[in-house]
Image: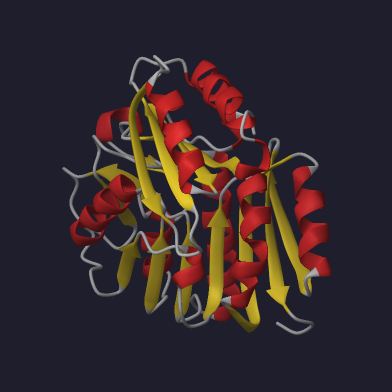
Amino acid sequence: MQLSESVDGVGAVTILIRVEGGEIVDQLHQGLVKLSRVEEVRCRRDVDGCWLVTACGALNSDPDRMLQAVGALVDQFDSMAEIIDVRRGGSELPGGGKGYQISARFMVAGDNAQPAANTIILDAAHVFGTGAHASTKLVVQAMEDIAGEEGGLPARVLDVGTGSGVLALIAARLGAEEVLGIDVCEDAVAVARRNIVANGLDGQVIVASTPLAEVTGSYQLVLANVTASVFLRLAAEIIKRLNAGGLLVVSGLQGRQGDEVEAVLVDLGMRSVNRLAQGKWHCLILCNGSKA
């Protein structure tokens, strides 16, 4: 996995590792704390009995070298451990919080801005995904296209890997009645919850660190702006939570990854509806089943 595949913005890097077996966790933990580029290590159990280990880098760490160092350590455990997510967190909003246009309709601004229907307010000093990355903008474009065709977004939306919550917040602004954002990073969840309150959307948008496997119910629209490797591991579980005829928006795909992910989803019963692109980044829109 390349860092550039999954990082939106600047700031300290967080690497999430999935591990099988408590003995492996202990060995991995010992190895991680010895790496000078790793500032903090956290461990917790997953719903399926595996462990999730989070390695947090120092603010001044070179992100590519940190990923290489952690990746080399994880490789020593073969299939017993794998990196499943890489992101930057706690970065500052571009423009010093003054705001920028994430789409023709919506502006993202810092927490000193006034709430407005077309303004998404984010904690300017602690942003887990600013929305400025092309992959995020493509999801916003996809949602606006869907809302335009349907007269608003479907009622129930699931945002996988919500980060700062920016996509979940925009989904609510576009008419979704109930939005659930999930993220494995508990720090991101805490910040996203503050963003929900700042935008006056508490109750309509809920963010939790609930693992995807524990999410109950079904959704009419699922958003997944993650790396290709992470998405492919989660694809079957994501589809299980999608209504028949529901829509799936997948972003964070570079180059030929768009074709590869689309082929996998078609094999799983999805139907391609549209594809958006900005530079090397691709975003897929698919329907669950033969009819939208």
When the figure is inspected, residue 252 is found, relative to residue 264, above or below; the finding is above
Assign the C terminus to one quadrant of the image: bottom right
Q: How is the image coloured?
A: secondary structure
Q: Residue 187, how many percent across, how many down?
A: 29, 45
Query: Can residue 106 be seen at all in this image of the molecule?
Result: no
Q: Is residue 119 left or right of residue 88?
A: left
Assign the N terminus to one quadrant of the image: top right
Query: Can residue 41 be seen at all in this image of the molecule?
Result: yes
Observer-nearest of 189 and 282: 189
Choose top left, top right, bottom left or bottom right for residue 11: top left
Q: Residue drawn 52% across and 47% down?
A: 136
Q: Is residue 4 left or right of residue 253?
A: left
Q: Residue drawn 45% across and 73% down?
A: 215
Q: Residue drawn 75% across and 85% down?
A: 291
Observer-nearest of 157 and 72: 72
Q: Is residue 14 left or right of residue 237?
A: left
Q: Residue 102, how many percent across, how many down?
A: 45, 46
Choose top left, top right, bottom left or bottom right for residue 146: bottom right
Q: Residue 64, how many percent across, how many down?
A: 54, 20
The count of marks equals 0
Choose top left, top right, bottom left or bottom right for residue 67: top right
Q: Residue drawn 41% across and 52% down?
A: 184
* Direction front: furthest residue: 23
Q: Residue 234, how many percent across, how many down?
A: 61, 60
When the figure is inspected, residue 235 is found, relative to residue 87, above or below; the finding is below
Observer-nearest of 33 and 219: 33
